[in-house]
Image (tube, grey):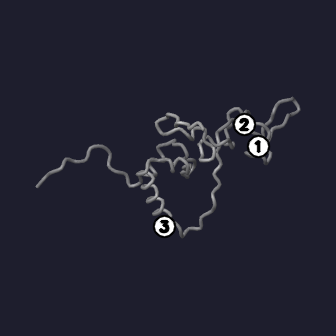
Amino acid sequence: MTMYPPPVGRPASATPVHDYLAAGPHPGVPDGYVVMPAQLVASMPLPWQQAMVQILAEFHQAFAHLDWPEYRVVPSRRERLVNLDEEQLAEVGYLVEMDAEGELVYRERGGKRIENPEETEVLVSCSDPIPSQFRNATEDTPPRGFPAQQSWR
């Protein structure tokens, strides 16, 4: 009979995805969602893509019966209220006005005054920094970083 030594390290978790996401922060993991830009997923090495397709197919098969909403993913960044213009403030549900003493006052849409606008951060939309197939300045750059040879006609 062969005796194997006990495993070294922490025992395997019964909730590895939860544990990984909770150990963040991780890019693309805001408040209970995992967002993966399709262009990056499609550019992964082929074995990763094949594994991803298998996992996604099983996920969708298991949860297809749910009444799925449509999700709108908006690239955003954290900014302090004091750094936003009026259009950005309106987008995130705030407004700014001048009080009788000439001081700027920031308010929520419902009128509640924001006491520390210099410290208050909100998510405001921004241009998507992840290259897409239609907007990629390095489109001709292979994975090793050397520009592809251009043919001069």
For the residue marked with disc 1, what is the amino acid?
A: Tyr
Q: CA distance from mark 3 to mark 1?
A: 41 Å
Q: In the rendered view of the protein, which quadrant contains the N terminus?
A: bottom left
Q: CA distance from mark 2 to mark 3?
A: 43 Å
Tell which residue pokes out farthest to the left in this image. 1
Q: Residue at x 32, y 45 (%)?
A: 10
Q: Which numbered disc, 3 or 1, marks the residue that appears first in the sequence?
A: 3
Image-quadrant location for residue 100: top right
Marker disc for residue 94: 1
Q: In the rendered view of the protein, which quadrant contains the C terminus?
A: top right
Check whether the beta carbons of the residues at disc 3 and disc 1 lie within 8 A of each other: no
Marker disc for residue 147: none
Q: Judging from the image, what secondary structure is the residue with disc 1 in?
A: strand
Q: Residue at x 55, y 49 (%)?
A: 39
Marker disc for residue 61: 3
For the residue marked with disc 2, what is the amino acid?
A: Leu
Q: Which numbered disc, 1 or 2, marks the residue that appears first in the sequence?
A: 2
Check whether the beta carbons of the residues at disc 1 and disc 2 lie within 8 A of each other: yes
Check whether the beta carbons of the residues at disc 2 and disc 3 lie within 8 A of each other: no
Q: CA distance from mark 1 to mark 2?
A: 8 Å
Q: Nearer the viewer, mark 3 or mark 1?
A: 3
Tell which residue pokes out farthest to the right in this image. 100
Left or right, 103 with reference to 34: right
Q: Residue at x 78, y 47 (%)?
A: 109
Q: In front: 148, or 53? A: 148
Marker disc for residue 81: 2
Q: In this picture, is 16 found above or below 60?
A: above
Mark 2, Cα crowd under 10 Å, few <14 / some 14-19 / many 20+, is: many
Residue 52's spot in the image, x, y percent? 45, 55
